[in-house]
Structure formats: structure tokens, C-alpha cells
Image: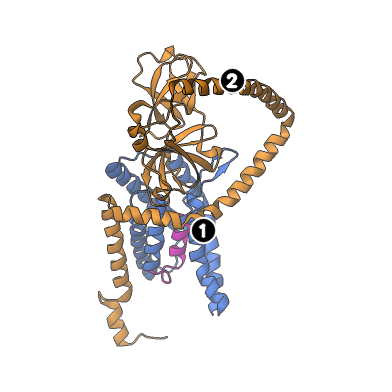
Amino acid sequence: MAFQSSFSRGINSGPLNRYILELTICITVSLSFVLMSLSKSTTVSNMKYFIVTVSKPGLVFANKPFKLVSDFIQYFEKMSNYKILNKSLENENNFLKKEFNKVNLLEVENFRLKNLLKLQEVDYVQKLSARIIIDGYRNDNNSIYIDIGKKNGLKINDLVFNENGLLGRVSQVGRYSSKVLTIFSSNSVLPGIAVNTKQSVFARGDGDRLVLKHLENKFKLEHNELVISTDAAGFFKEGIIIGKVVKTLNDVYIHPIAKKSDSIFVNVLIFDFKKLNLD
Amino acid sequence: MISTFFLRIIPYFLLILFIFFEFAPAYFSEKEIIKPYFTFMFLYALINNDSEKFRPLWILLIGLFYDFLDGEVVGITSLFFLITLHLLKRKHSTIILIDFRIIWINFILILLSYISVNKLVQFIFFDVSFEFKRVVLSFFISIILFPLFNSIVRKFNNRLGYMNE
């Protein structure tokens, strides 16, 4: 049986033993970080966005297996009902051909009218593509992090959307990454307009649906009609699809068309207010 | 010697990988996946099986990294695990063999208190509400998966100890 020397026994039992010292220092550092984040320190915020940016390769790597399995499932889902899918795509194609002809006519008309009014093209909106790197699905009201930030010209309240419609708005901006508050969050309130009934609405996030706020008679809205964004309060870009109205026997709400899970890539609209004010 | 070094760094490498897995966006066929608390389970299993070798500094660094990716309150995970490490060290110094059921119950209680404190602080100081259904589901999946994680870590530790001898 081996015994420790009286010297080492003396050190290990005292308050200055290496483990206790290290533990005390680590607890103090942790506590100071907690206090700094509670006081909303900019140092912690900058460190956070730096670490999020640095972690991007690891997060992209971790996403790969999920993406592979997802693509595999989607492929087999599509293959299993390819006949129905083909038919619906043919119908959609015919419809879009007709719509495309209409748009061409409208564009020509629009160009002529602009010339008549001597209006100049003002490029105050820029569209950027970004990748979702963190999905805090358990935290923060469905917020996500994207891989572009201040360096790319992003600002707070810039709109984030995908091919299906509006997804949210930028709520915090780091140097190379940003946090997006999705429309599903209870902290998100969107101004919109119903396309058919022309009713102005405010939609607040509520899980997987949007509830209507400040609307006296919700039942005036039509079932399945489209709701698009408006530029109310000057914060939003108008015309982006938010969702469709769902009417039940005792409630009316909006079912958002765009979901985080639609695609790993999103678009961000950068709205240049300075240019807008100069006009 | 090189193989022992690699075996020693494997837990840290896996911890970082689990953190990435926990935060990377994961959707299956346009549906979100409910992920368990991978990092919490793995870190707890590591501390529980080999509290002597796990240094507080590594817990601090891993906890801070987790919190920087997680949410608003940075430092809370490391604080929780540092306290857990100390409690487990004290327990292991006095008790030689602990029944797995007690380990499991301890894990459930610590995870529950971690989630409650974290969410409460976020709600009070940052006015952040959370997805109750997802958190509860993640919590239960973590409880179910913990024995598996714990046994893998225990086997790995035994193998490492055998190689060192």
C-alpha cells in the first residue's frame, strides 16, 4: 500500500490545492460571463458573433448527414408519386406560361408610364443570399443565425425570405453573422394586406401559425386568400408573401407559407433608407 | 503513445462534434427534428465515469463554447457543470460503486434544474419565451438515451484504462 508524503498531503488538503484553485477561478470566470451577458455587454455579443462565424465550417459539416438523409427521403417521396407530380407540374407550367405573357405586357406598359412620368430607377433594395448556420429550435422563439452580417451591409430589421415567402427579419447583427427573428416568434408582428378583401392586418407569431391583431372583424377575410407584406411604418418591403388565411368555425388565422425547413439558404433584402430619403 | 494521445482527445473531439450536431439546422423532408441534449448527456456521462481526469478548465471552455452558440446567457452551462463536477468528485471520493438508477435520477434532476434555471433567466432578463413542447420532448428523449450514452462512455473509459495499464 502506498502513502502520500506529508508534504503533498499538506498541499492537497489546504484551500490552495490545485484542483480547488482551478475550480474557483473557472467558477469566477463563468459567473462574470453570466453577469456580463445579463447586463447585455457588447463584448459578450461581439465574442458570440465571432464564435458563431468561426464555427461555421463545423456547423456546415454537422448539417451534411441530416441534409443527405433528407434529400434521400425527399427523392423517394417524389419518386413514389411521380405521375401525380408530373401532372401537377404540367398544369402549373401551362398556367405560368399564360401569366408570363401577361407580365410581359405589364412590363412594357410600366416602362411606357415611367417614361411618361419621367421616373428614374432607384436601386435602394439589394438582395443577398445567406445560409442558415444555427437553428436554435429550442430557444429564443425560433430564431436562426445566418452567415452574413454588417460587413455585407446588413442592418437590423432587414427582411429575410425564401422562395416561398417571408421568413423573418434581422434582429441582431454581428460582423460576419446575424440573428434572425422568424415570423413564428411571439415577438414578431408583421404588417400585411389581404390580397382579395384588401383588409390591412397585423400578424403576430404563435408557434406554427400567425394570429391576427387589431382587426375588428376577422371573419370578413376570405378562406385561403393570400396575405402579403406592406411597407407600414417604413420598416418593411411590400409585396412579399406571408401566408394564407385559414378560417375555422370560431377562429381566423394565417398559415405561413415559408418555413425554416424549406431550404438551408435564404435571401435578405437590404433596404437603403438613406437613398430613399434623398429621393 | 500516439494512439493513447488520440484516445485521450477523442472525448473532447466528440464533445465539440455533439455541440455542432445540436445547433446545426436539421430538417428531414421539410420537417424539423427534435434533438436531445446531446452535449449535456455526453458531458455528464464523461464526468460521471471519470471525474478525476476531467479538469475544470476544459469544462469552462466547452460550456462557454456551448453557450455562445446557444442563446443569451453565456456562462450558465459551464457554471452548472463545474458545480456538478465538484459534487460528483465528492461523491466518488466517498462511495466506491454507485447504482446506475441513482446516477440516472441524478442526471434527470440536474438536467431538469439546468433547463428550468436557463429558461427562467432568459424569460426574466431577456423576455424570451421558449418552445415548451420541443423542450419537453428533448428532455424526455435525453432521459431515454442517457443509459446508452453512459454505457458507451463507461466502456470507452475501461478500454482507455486497460490500454494505459
Identify residue for label 1: B17
Does residue B53 show up magenta in the picture? yes
Asked which secondary structure carries label 2, the reply is helix
Does residue A130 show up magenta in the picture? no
Q: Nearer the viewer, residue A244 or A125?
A: A125
> Which secondary structure dominates the residues rendered in magenta?
helix
In which quadrant will I find the C terminus of chain B? bottom right
Q: Residues within 10 Å of mark 1 (few under 14, many from 20)?
A: some
Tell me which chain appears orange: A
Evaluate whether residue A25 shows in this view: yes
Instruction: State how far apart marks 1 and 2 are (Cα).
Output: 55 Å
Evaluate whether residue B67 shows in this view: no
Which span is picked out in magenta?
Answer: B41-55
Q: Is residue A192 above or below residue B151?
A: above
Q: Is residue A36 above or below residue B57?
A: above
Q: Residues within 10 Å of mark 2 (few under 14, many from 20)?
A: few
Residue A167, position as x, y percentages in the image: 46, 35
Q: Amino acid at mark 1?
A: Leu
Q: Nearer the viewer, residue A112 or A271?
A: A112
Q: In which image quadrant can residue B48 be found? A: bottom left
Residue A237, position as x, y percentages in the image: 42, 30
Q: Nearer the viewer, residue B109 or B26?
A: B26
Residue B33, position as x, y percentages in the image: 53, 42
